[in-house]
Image (spheres, grey):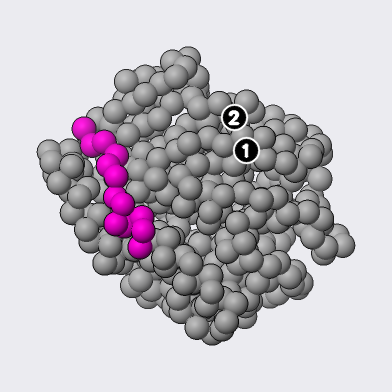
Amino acid sequence: MLFSSARPVAAALVLTATAVAGSLLMASPALARRTAATHATHSAQAHGAGSTAAATTAAAGTGAATAAAAGTPTAPSITSPSAGAAPAAPAAPAATSKVATSPIFVLNSLDADISVIDPRTFREVKRIPTGKEPHHLYLTPDRKTMVVANALGDSLTFLDPVTAEVQRTIYGISDPYHLRFSPDMKWLVLAGNRLDHVDIYKWQPQNQAQPLALTKRFSAPKTPSHLSIDTRSTVVYASMQDSSEIMAIDLNTLSVRWKVPVGKLPADVYLTPDDKYLLVALTGDHFVEVYEVGGLPQPKLVKRIDTGDGAHSFRALGDRRHVLVSNRAANTISKISLDSLSVVDVLKVPGGPDDMEILPDGRTLLVTSRWARKLTVMDLQTKQITTQVKVGKSPHGVWTLDQMPRQ
């Protein structure tokens, strides 16, 4: 079994990289595009401090790491505060009210914890400790569990999205940076940003002792960043930040379909509701590239949309017609029409806007302001910031159960 281990040198380098990137953002957007765009906290140490961390992970992993590299299952260790709290079989999502009552979760990457925010008062009500560097989180398709990926902690934290209580923690998960469940809940896919791999885990919630079994590991150089899975649970799309590529993995055959070059420093990827187009945010540039992928043996570049410096993270508006993209270095968010594949509106959001969430009223936008250590709340109708909530260091992922659809 592989347990999380302390990496003080890597953590210090990460903090330094974040501080430098934040100052560069204020001094020079052009320079910030080259420096701050590289995920600032995690991939800033992917090469350098990351090589030391990788060696530490490999040494700690011993037989488990060897088995994982060969694509054979390993047995992660688990702590379970509530044995009965594990997610059950998939269920249809409940009807969404227009009033948000469930807690809002913000991941504080450099504090190794989660801010829990009351959606009515927009006040932080508590902090939940996690493993080192929680960057991204994902709601299981049955809506019963919020899963937090702790990259440097080599662990996953499972939360109740209603009570904000920890359901359990699974250790021995190698470098979980970004994550996606397949819609059919058969697979959990994890991107190892620092260790250059994409892992496919079989999800078996009926097995309390081993709910996750590593089925296959794909080499993904260099610096796999974000993932997307089609609606039929057949294809995973992964961006590779430092080699400026995207890759498609077939979930039926567990093989790579294709790998192609794209623009500079691709980060988030967004698949349109009809599975036809894949949008790729270029954090090292000011474009979103649009690729036709549905039904084609190879992706076809159909358009480059000029958004803003540091195009980084997507969030669908919930109407199946528009998607937002945060431009981290430009301090803006672009609204893209999926009909015309063009920018139809621009919002100004300070502090390095990163991940986003939309409350069920359809007008309240939540944005993590990465450099400002705040959660920014904006009214989409008036385009005005209504409040900012002080959270922890380098806030990254944000999510809540009460949300607009993510399509």
Which x, y percent locates residue 300?
47, 74
Which amino acid type is marked by label 1?
Answer: Val
| 11 in the magenta segment | yes
Instruction: Tell me the number on the disc at residue 152.
Output: none
Judging depth in this view, the residue of 283 and 231 nearest the camera is 283
Q: Quadrant of residue 118?
A: top right
Residue 138 left/right relative to 73:
right
Residue count near mark 1 (Cα–Cα under 10 Å), binned few <14, some 14–19, many ≥20: many
Judging depth in this view, the residue of 282 and 134 nearest the camera is 134
Extreme residue in the top direction = 84
Mark 1–mark 2 CB contact (< 8 Å): yes
Question: What SS does tag 1 mark?
Answer: strand
Which residues are the magenta region? 1-13
Q: Judge whether 272 appears above or below 141 on screen.
A: below
Which x, y percent locates residue 12?
36, 58
Q: Judge whether 74 appears above or below 278 on screen.
A: above
Q: Quadrant of residue 343?
A: bottom right
Residue at image mark 2: 164
Image point (79%, 38%), residue name = 120
Judging depth in this view, the residue of 146 and 92 nearest the camera is 146
Which x, y percent locates residue 203?
38, 32
Q: Judge whether 391 appears above or below 271 on screen.
A: above
Question: What SS does tag 2 mark?
Answer: loop
Residue at image mark 1: 116
